[in-house]
Amino acid sequence: MTDIPTNSDLSLLGRSEHRLPASPAEATLETFVNRTQGRNYTIHLNCPEFSSICPVTGQPDTAHLEIFYIPDERCIETKSLKFYLASYRNHASFNEEIVNRVLDDVVKACAPKQAIVRGKFAPRGGIQLTCEASHPNREEPLKL
């Protein structure tokens, strides 16, 4: 069995931190070194219970949020992702803004070769909204 090196850059993993960030601006997406940089592979992060607040009505919005990315040098640490996504619970923002901000924050954190963020939001007023954003920006979004 191979020893897994500890990474002092990770502040949440292995700690019983319970305080969630108050907003996405306060949250930090932590990363670790991709130990398989010579291979293109896809990481699929799935958050079926994402929630935020509608900026107009103040009502809660819920979504199934998915992040797909091909890592380059760094990967997203999932506990920090959990805290980051939970920071949207009391954050007022339109669905489309959320999907694009999550993509921007993932790209800023780990500079992936490619990334897609998809949010399938629960119906409001009889309309179900799905929004997808990709990096690098494409004329036609990549379909998964």
Image (cartoon, helix red, strand yellow):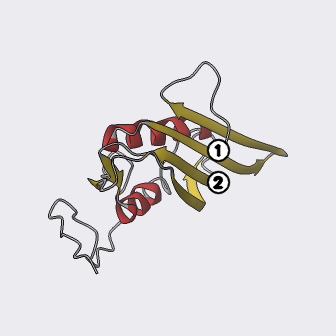
Whether residue 61 is visible: no
Q: State the residue position of label 2.
A: 63
Question: Would residue 22 be found to the left or right of residue 33 on screen?
Answer: right
Neighbourhood count class around disc 2 (C-alpha, 10 Å): few under 14, some 14–19, many 20 upward? many
Neighbourhood count class around disc 1 (C-alpha, 10 Å): few under 14, some 14–19, many 20 upward? few
Disc 1 marks a residue whose amino acid type is Thr
Choose between 32 and 98: the one closer to the eye.
32
Quadrant in which the N terminus appears: bottom left
What is the x, y in percent for residue 53? 57, 50
Choose between 104 and 72: the one closer to the eye.
72
Q: Secondary structure at mark 1?
A: loop
Q: Is residue 75 above or below residue 93?
A: below
User: Residue at left 49%, top 39%?
Assistant: 115
What is the x, y in percent for residue 132? 62, 37
User: Residue at left 32%, top 43%?
Assistant: 109
Quadrant of the rendered image containing residue 17: bottom left
Q: Is residue 125 above or below residue 85?
A: above
Q: Residue 57: which numbered mark, if any?
A: 1
Disc 2 marks a residue whose amino acid type is Ala
User: Residue at left 34%, top 54%?
Assistant: 36
